Amino acid sequence: MKLKINRNIPLIDQHDKNFMYGGKFGGNFIPETLKKPIDDLTKLFAKLRRDKNFLRERNHHFTNYIGAPTPFIKLENLTDHLGGAQIYAKVVSEANGGAHKIYNATVHCLIAKKAGKKYIVGDTGAGYAGKMLSMAAKKFGLKCKIFMGAKDIKRQRPNVEAMRKNGAEIVPVTTGSQTLVDAVSECMRYWVSNCDTSHMCVGSTVGPNIFIKICAWSTAQISRELMQQVKEEFGKIPKKLKLINCVGGGSSAAGFWNEFINTHAEFIGVEAGGPKNSKLHAAPLTNGSKIGILHGAAQYVIQDKEGQIGSTESISAGLDYPGISPLHCFLKDTKRAKYTSASDEDALKAYLLVSKLENISPSLEPSHAFAEAIRIAPKLKNSEVIIVNSCGDSLKDKDIIKQKLGSYIR
Amino acid sequence: MKSKIALAFENCKKEKRAALITYTVAGDNTKNNSLKILNKISKHADILELGFPHNTPIADGGQIQGSSHRALKNGMKLKDVFQIVKKFKKTNPLKPLILMGYYNLIYQNGESNFLKNCKSSGVDGLIIVDLPYPENKDFANRCKKKGINFIQLLSPTTSRERMKNIIKNSHDMIYYISMLSTTGGKLKVSPKKILENYNKIKRINPSKNLVIGFGITDKTISSLKSANGLVVGSLLCKTITNSLKMRQNPVTKLDKVVYNLKKKII
Ligand SMILES: Cc1ncc(COP(=O)(O)O)c(C=O)c1O
């Protein structure tokens, strides 16, 4: 069966009655206990997204709390240095808190309030999703609990400190690889036990269908802004336009591309290739992983023949996840987006080059996207345009960068 | 022909007692020991649940995660699980055995292949934690055609309408999750309240065999004994963990624990 995108329906709604995209990605592979909470949340969200007051409220917070629009800038020096396509950045790291995770966190807190919940729980890898949820929870008066792998707590210290300052309880997860995949599992377990009092926020476009929807619906703000900014800059959508975004779970990319789905803009998703000399990676789409079930959804996922979820490795905690959003599986199979990967080393090099030449300093996640931009830009004509989503700031990666490169610049 | 599961419940009803249902993980702590455990505890238990381990179990608490981890570290594969079942069934052909686990392992094995393996090794039923109703309709029907029980789950969050539908689509056994919890949680709802819920469900269709699981230990089991069946899992996994820590034989330890559980409900 050849999969096709439907131009008349929002991407997040292109699922069948079993909540599967293209008949094979997504769904709700969940324990019975979560059926009702997920069903309730699905109904509530369906209502809220049609509610003018709710949208007004959301837009108010997007503008005044998160800060809209985030800057859209030309990277003149990088463009000159590489001598090919014109390179731009959408500096989403200028959003309140420093990353795109604030959109999803804010919307989830708004929904939790509408649902009458007093507690909110979430997972985090790089610590951004947790930091943002703790920020938004504080703002909206919710008690917040964050699940984070013990390995990530060590490697993403600045964000952990921010969470603590915001008064969130951080639960270290010491099972398995002690990274994002285990944090999401543990958070879901917590929700199974506490779904009557707590709202759960999944930190990316993964998990049971409703979490994918809410997350992508929230980050779509990025491309709503970008569409306008592109039209202001170029008068129209440039003939040859590439939108490059890193993908871990895929929330940043989904939001960056959403408004451009029905245009001719090319989408390139960059996964974490892991260390150059390692067999391990976090790039299920690039490396042809098979479809499997992870965290309640069918997706391409790193696993062994038996169906045990496989180990991953990446320098970037935010991309270090064996699965990938069902939305991106769908975009891949419909050939609407292309996916590739960048190694740890290439991401570090890209971080360094961009930080040296420009006023921005991407964190290790978007540095994967910059690595791809840097790789292809010299081969492209000057009339071509590349836009990279710079969705995080390197400050949180200071320790890792210092350790790998000897020094840290920003 | 009646299923072995149905017969086990009939037998218990004749004896006016609840069925004792145990859960252990295949390969915990070794392939041999888990077979020995099944052989031993089947003298006391009426139905055996055997977990096929997954490394990302989203509905299991620490104890069962620990058991699964031990089993996987021993290199436990699905084919080993079926081998254990086959060997067990050779000496205990009438004792019902239910496999329990997560859907991804079935998905990777292929549904048809998996069911074929179930059939040839003698599996009587399946509990798939993350394949709820109605998504499980097709698979449940395929199970039925093969004479394998697909065991539906109900939880305190399940609405009454939904319960009716699930019960209508159920086979010889239904599993009621006692409380909002992963496996291995402390019983945070009173047995009285659990039985109240249980009886409400029972009234929807009194002829269905309804068992209660999650949070049941030697301390709480007797207060729930009016149910058709009671499942004990995490306590058994914990017993294995502790006996390994104390360098004791997990097989004899488990035999004792299950014997005691049985004593408490007869
Ligand atoms: C800055 C940044 N970019 C990207 C990601 C990857 O997540 P996603 O693919 O959902 O955008 C993360 C995740 O933590 C992140 O912190």
Image: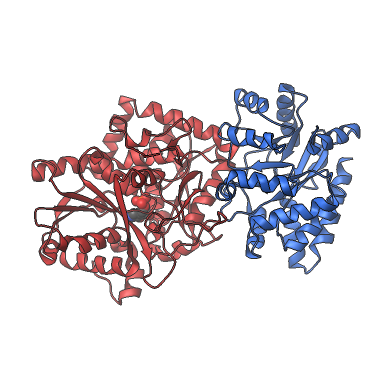
Chain colours: A red, B blue
Q: Which residue is at 34% across, 26% downward?
A: A50
Q: Quadrant of residue B46?
A: top right
Q: Which residue is at 82% across, 33% downward?
A: B226
- Figure check: A195 above or below A150: above
Q: Quadrant of residue A210?
A: top left
Quadrant of image for the C terminus of chain A: bottom left
Indicate left or right for B95 with A116 as reference: right
Q: Is residue A140 visible?
A: no
Residue A81: percent from left, percent from top: 12, 66
- Figure check: A359 above or below A115: below
Total marks drawn?
Answer: 0
Closer to the camera in the image, B151 or A197 = B151
Residue most extreme to the bottom: A406
Residue A97: percent from left, percent from top: 31, 51
Residue B77: percent from left, percent from top: 64, 58
Q: Which residue is at 37% across, 57% downward?
A: A286
Closer to the camera in the image, B194 or B201 = B201
Residue B134: percent from left, percent from top: 57, 31
Quadrant of image for the N terminus of chain A: top left
Indicate left or right for B248 with A314 as reference: right
Closer to the camera in the image, B157 or A255 = A255
Q: Which residue is at 9% across, 57% downward?
A: A382
Q: Is residue A338 visible?
A: yes
